[in-house]
Amino acid sequence: MSSQAKQNLFYLIFGLLFFSTTEPFGYASIDIDPSWTESLVMAVNQNFTFGTDFIFNYGPLGFLNTALLPEKISPWVLFLFHSFLLLNYLMIIKLSFLKMGDKWWQAAIVAVLILLPWGFFADVTFTLFYLMLFWLLYVQQTKSTLGLILAVVLAVLIFYIKVNLSLIAYTVLLLSVLYFFLAKIISWKAALLTLVSLILFTASFSLLLNVSIPDYLAASLKIIDAYQDGQAVNILKIKELGLLLILEFIILGVVLLYIFKNLAYFVDNLYLYIISALAWFLCFKQAHTATGHYNVFGFFLFLPVLAVLIFLFAKHFKGGARMVFTVLILQIISTQFIRLAIANYDLKEYALFYFPIKVVNEVKSSKNALNLINTVKYKSPYNYFSKFYHYDYQKNFQQEEINNIRLLPQAIINKIGDRSVDIMPWEISYIFFNQLNYNPRPIIQTYQANSEWLAHKNEEKYNGASAPDFVLANIHDYREQNPLWMDKGAYLALKRNYSLLDTINMPHEKLFLFEKNTNISTPDYQEVTKQEGQLGEEINLPETSNKLLYLNADIHYSFFGKIARLFFQPPYLRCKVIYQDNTEDYFRIPPPILKGGILASEKVISESDFLRFATEGENKKIKSLTFWSKYTWGFKSDFDYSLKKTK
């Protein structure tokens, strides 16, 4: 068999492996992350306008990433999408074969390790961003107009899947086209064609997918600006984080070493190095905002494919193949350590990571390791296509185990009927699985309303004519934050404009059903005082009898705090709360939330506290607040604050 015939056979084998390891779609589940995927499905089903009715990181094509399909979307849309990805992967493999020559089989091994879904396919938006960079580099090398059009298609897909990353994708695309034109890599006609195609595709999809582009972009900028502050958390053990950071920068050092060895051609490869560094940084930020095992795992998966870009497109570059292999080996060491850590350093649990969860459950229940052979049943092209033929949207609501803990009592469903309903703070699965008429706050989950602007959008909704008829509500803490300091305007509107109708005892929690009052009104905030404060200085609060007291403070990061926020995580701001009985609580408070205002008159951190707050009951009063940080270098010590009261 000739070398070309062997390569063609590998393309076929790779395609079969791709469809064997790719999940075609998923069904709905429960918890904080699955809930927003269900909210996205209902937004598409009910034809919400993205950017106004629905403000989130994900757009109307977000299901291409989540694989939870809206009702009218055929699963074959996902098949076409997966086929498109596969063709892109095969193109990368083909160029790698050409680059490796007689040693093409080495590239084949690397391709299986880093391009199949168990490797590179960790987040589809970063996959698409990577492919866009690939085609831009291909254009730089070949002057291909087709490569430009494919880059446009990829950018538009990102725009309607995950809008915050798309802002960077569009910027990179437009600056690249400008560079290609000025460097005479493409003609003015090709540059104009690219620009017109981008505008037409973006505008056409906005009409088709019901997106208000100005609002979509403006809201995304607000989410991006506050995201780091509200979402930053470290879930890893300190020793694990330290080791993984060392491994990350060893890999970076390996790449920089090879670049240094080829320094004579640095300028020739500058464009490649810039966009590779940008992709590295973006993935690093995503992995280390919420620094947990799976996020950092995804970052390591991304590193070898970035090395492949340098290998494929660097001019006069020596040692590219060795660099890719070295990065891959370090990545394997790092990812396997993470898997071992997730398994709590239990070798048996670690070994089971490599098998489908259904097979793992079979092995554990039967205590027979031979059941691992059933992996073949779940990992095959037949299984992929069989799932398509048996797909049924209604199966989302036929999951007995989930229904047992999410279906509301029939009496509650009867009370709500066809009227509209929202849920606070974020477990939207209650609305999805009960197939209720969803009418959410624009920022659909409380933890995302983490700035003055975002929280105000939700407050406007609940104080306006389009407010939902019912709200299912309770409170939950989130990453050390006070549960009622998030989304404060919506909770205040709930107290003012809704009345408690019923209490629902669910298996895992208690829900309170509120009904909208006939007359609704916007709160009148009256300023009590405006003063200057100091970090670490106690702020004594006045008694306000039956009025609610809110504190707004504008605490700024220092220069070094801004640097830390940009390149890793922001320093944490904390608040010490002393109550009238001299008991204390401590919370993390993101500065953008504090700027929008926090409840400073009473303690509301439990279900019983929340019930009293919402129904004019008496809660423990707050005596004083003290804002502080153990990272004193991260903040300016002086700040302005004001106290406001309202009914």
Image: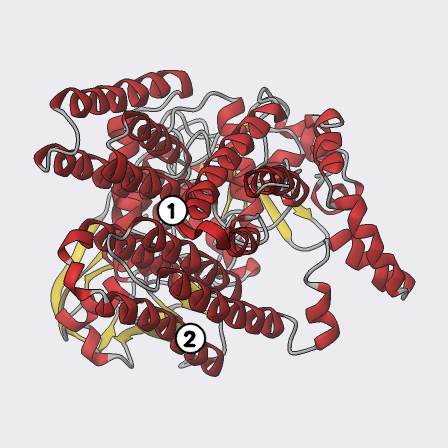
Q: Dot 2, how many residues are within 10 Å of its Cα: few (below 14), some (14-19), or many (20+)?
A: some
Q: Residue at x 28, y 38 (%)?
A: 136
Q: Residue at x 55, y 26 (%)?
A: 80
Vertical relation: 427 (above or below) 639:
above
Spot occupied by residue 614 in the image (x, y as percentages of width and height) = 48, 49
Q: Is residue 515 visible?
A: no
Q: As rendered, which of 595 and 185 lies closer to the eye?
A: 185
Give the amino acid type for the residue marked by disc 2 in the picture. Answer: Leu
Q: As rendered, which of 100 and 216 lies closer to the eye?
A: 100
Please, what secondary structure does the residue beneath circle 1 have?
Answer: helix
Numbered label attached to residue 492: 1
Please, what secondary structure does the residue beneath circle 2 have?
Answer: helix
Vertical relation: 70 (above or below) 615:
above
| Residue 219 falls in image quadrant | top left
Spot occupied by residue 100 in the image (x, y as percentages of width and height) = 43, 52
The mark nearer the N terminus, 2 or 1, is 2
Q: Is residue 378 left or right of residue 617?
A: right
Q: As rendered, which of 553 and 348 lies closer to the eye?
A: 348
Badge 2 is on which residue? Answer: 247
Give the amino acid type for the residue marked by disc 1 in the picture. Answer: Leu
Q: CA distance from mark 2 to mark 1?
A: 47 Å
Q: Is residue 328 left or right of residue 563?
A: right
Q: Dot 1, how many residues are within 10 Å of its Cα: few (below 14), some (14-19), or many (20+)?
A: many
Numbered label attached to residue 512: none
Type of colouring: secondary structure
Q: Residue at x 59, y 35 (%)?
A: 68
Q: As rendered, which of 325 and 98 lies closer to the eye?
A: 98
